Image (cartoon, grey):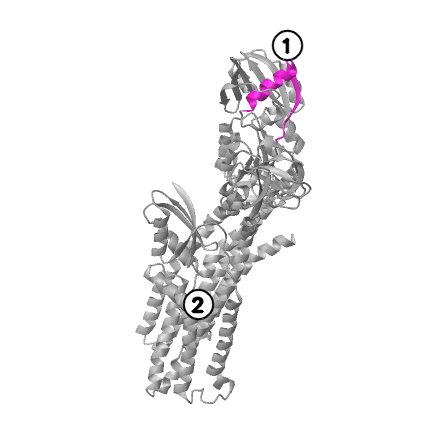
Amino acid sequence: MKKIQLQISGMTCSACSSGLEKYLKKQKGIIDANVNLILSLANITYKNISIKTMESYINKAGFKSEGEFKSIKTEEYTKKDKKYLCLFGIVLIIFFLITMAPMLKLQIPYINPNCPKIYVSIIGSISLLFLVYGTPILKSGLKNLFHKIPNMDSLVFFSVSFSFLYSLYATVKIFLGETSYLHHLYFESVCMVLYFIKLGRYLENKNKDKTKEAIKTLLEVTPKKAVKLERGKDIVVNIDEIQKGDTLLVRPGEKIAVDGVVLKGETHVDESFITGESKPVLKEKGSKVIAGSINYESALEYKAIRIGKESTISEIVTLVVEATNQKTKTQKMADKLSGYFVPFLFLFVFLICGRQLVNNKPFEEVFLHVVTIFSVACPCALGLAVPMVVMVENNKCAKKGIFIRNSEVLELAKNTDTIVFDKTGTLTYGKLMIDKYFNYLSIKDKDLLNLVANIEALSTHPIKNAFTITRKLSVENFKIYEGMGISGEVLNNTYYLGNEKLANKLKIKEKYTKDYESLVEQGCSIIYVIENNYVIGLIGIKDTIRKEIKEVIKECKKQKLAVILLSGDNKTTAEIIGNELGIDKIVANVLPKEKGEFIESLRKENHKVIMVGDGINDAPALVKATIGISVNDGTDVAHNASSVILMNNNLQNILDLINISKEAVRVMKQNLFWAFLYNMTMLPIAVGLIAPFGIKMNPMVASIAMALSSLTVVYNALRLNKKGKKK
C-alpha cells in the first residue's frame, strides 16, 4: 500500500473536488482518496497500479494531473489578467449605456430600440465577445456534465447557454420584423454572469493564494546552492547535486543547505523558522544542524545526513499538506452537501419550473427563473466555508511550531477537559544527569558508571543520555523489559539495569532500602544495577523541570482543565515533581500498557483527553487519547503515535492549540451559516416565490450575489490571519 500526492488542474468549486474524490474511490487499485480544492491536490492511497493509471483516471474524470506534488503552486496574476478584466469591465459599462439608454434618457444615434436590427446586432456581438472571454468556464461546465460530475461551471454553462440561445432566437424574430421580441433579449445576462464569475474567481483565487504562502515560504527557506568540500577545494553545487555523506561548508551570514552534523567549527545559528525560538543556538562538533538555518559568526564544516524528502523542512511541509488534505467532520459534511447540491438543483429546476409551465405561466417568465436559478445557486461558498478556515489555521499553527498531522484536531481541541502529561522529557527537559549514586562493589566508581553507560547506549529511553562512555565495552544479548528496564551481557556476565519492578521480577532480596529512600527523597529516578541477582549499585538520575510548565498548568486550571501526571517512575519521585508544579492528580509506577488503559478509562467516562508525551512508553497512551501530542525531542515512535508535534518543545503551544481550535470552529460555523443562509434565501427569490411581495431577481443580480457569497466566506477566513498578527 503506497501514498502519493498529485497536483490537479481544472477544479473550480467543491462540486469538482468532491466529484473527483468519489470517482477516484470507485476505481480499481485506489484504496482511498482525498481531494483538496484549495491546494489543488489529490492525496491517494493505492495498491498494484501505476501513477500513469491514476493520472488517466483523473483525466477521464475531466481534470488534469500535473504530476507528483513538489511545491505549492500559486496563480501568476499578470498585467494581462488585470488588463482583460479592466477591458471587459469598460465594455460592460458601454454595453449597459447602450441597453439602458432609454431609461437614462440618453440619445445614441442608430444604437437604440428605434433601430432594432442595428441595436440587436451590436449588443449580440458584444455578448459574443464575452462568450469568447468565458470559453474556459463554459468548456469546463460541459466537460464535467459529460463526465457526470456537474459543478459550478455546469450551472454557469446552462445559465449562459439558455440566455444566449434564447436571445439568438429573439434576434432572428426581430430581423423577421417582430420587434416585440426586443423585450425578450437576455444578452446582458450572458455578459454579466460571465464577467462577474471571472472577477469573483480572480479575487477568490488571489485570496486563496494568501493561505498558501506559509507553506510556500517553508519550501523556499533552504538555499538553492551550497559549497561542497572536495579534495581541499570549495565547489559551488546545486542543492540537488548533494549526496549523503558529502562534506559541506557554510560561511557566516549564509544558510545551511541540508540537515547534517557539524564536523568542524563552532558558531551560533538562527533556527527560529523551525523552533520559534528567537535565541541563537550554539553549534559545535557533533551538533545537528537544520537546512535553512542561518549561520552567524564563523564558518562550519558539516556532513550531509538528510537530504531531499528526508529533510526536516520537507517533513514539516508534508505534515502541513497532509493535515490540510485530511478533512474535518464539518468539512466532510459540507463536501457531501455540496456534492449533492448540483444534482438536486437540476431536479429542483425541473420540478418547480415544469409546474409553472403546467400552470400556464408565460414561457419568458419561467425561462428567466431558470436562468436566474442557475446563476445564483452555486454551492461554491458552501465548499469553501470550512477548507479556507482549516488552511488558514494550519498555517497559523505551523508558524507557532505546532504541526498538526490530522485536521480533525482543529475541531476536537476546543472540547478538551483533561490534559495528561508524561514526566521525563515532557514536564522536564529530559536532559538527565547523575545526581547521586552508591557503589556496592570494590571496582572503581568510574568503571561502574562506564559499564552502565555501555549497556544504556543500546537503549532508546532518554535516561541513557545521563551517561557517558569513557571506554568501549562489547555488549551482547541486549534485551528490553517493557516499563521495567534493560539487560545485556558484558564479558559473559549478565547485567540488569532498571526500576524497582525489575528488581521484584528478579526476586532481589537485598535492595538497599535506606539508600533507595534517600535518593527518592531527593526526587531522583532510580536505576538498580544488578549482576548475577545481586545489586551492585544504585544510581539516582535527576531532571530539570521545563521553565514554562508552571505557567501552563496555572493557565490550565484557570480554564478549568483537569491536569494529570502519568508516569512510569516511582510514586515518590512523581509526587515530588507533581507537587512542585501544583498537579492535583498523580498516577505513577505504570507500565506503557497501563498508561494506555488509564487514558482509555478517561475516554469511557466521556472526557476529552489531550495526552502529552515523548517516548516509546507513551505511544499506547498517545494513540488512545482524543489528541496525542508529542514534543519534538521525543522518539520517532512517539511522533508516529501522536496527531500533533510541538516543534519548539514549548508546552505553552498546547493552550495556543486549544484557543486556535475555538477560533477555527467559531469561524467554520459562521461561514457555514452564511453559505446556507445565502442558498436558502436566494433560491426562493430566484424562482419567483417572493415576487408577490415585490422582491424579484434577474440573472445579472444573481451573478453578483453568487460572487459576493464566495468572497464573504473567503474574507471571513482571512480575518483569522489579521487576528493572529494583532496578537
Relative side of 669 to 555, left or right: left
Q: Residues within 10 Å of mark 2 (few under 14, many from 20)?
A: many
Q: Badges 1 and 2: C-beta atoms under 8 Å apart?
A: no
Relative side of 389 to 56, left or right: right
Query: Which of disc 2 and disc 1 is earlier in sequence?
Result: 2
Q: Which residue is mark 2?
A: 376
Q: CA distance from mark 1 to mark 2?
A: 89 Å
Camera-nearest residue between 652 and 316 = 316
Residue 189 appears in the rendering: no
Please say if 248 is above or below 533.
below
Q: Which residues are magenta?
A: 430-457
On the image, the x and y values in percent for residue 348 come to: 36, 65
Q: Which residue is mark 1?
A: 442
Q: Secondary structure at mark 2?
A: helix
Residue 185 placement: quadrant: bottom left
Q: Within the magenta stretch, is there residue 445?
A: yes
Please say if 44 is above or below 158.
above
Q: Secondary structure at mark 1?
A: loop
The residue sitting at 63% across, 27% down in the picture is 432
Camera-nearest residue between 689 and 576 = 576
Camera-nearest residue between 210 and 538 = 210
Q: Which residue, as the protein is rendered here, is positioned at the far left?
A: 358
The residue sitting at 50% across, 78% down in the picture is 93
Camera-nearest residue between 518 and 93 = 93
On the image, the x and y values in percent for residue 84 come to: 49, 71
Q: Within the magenta stretch, is there residue 280?
A: no
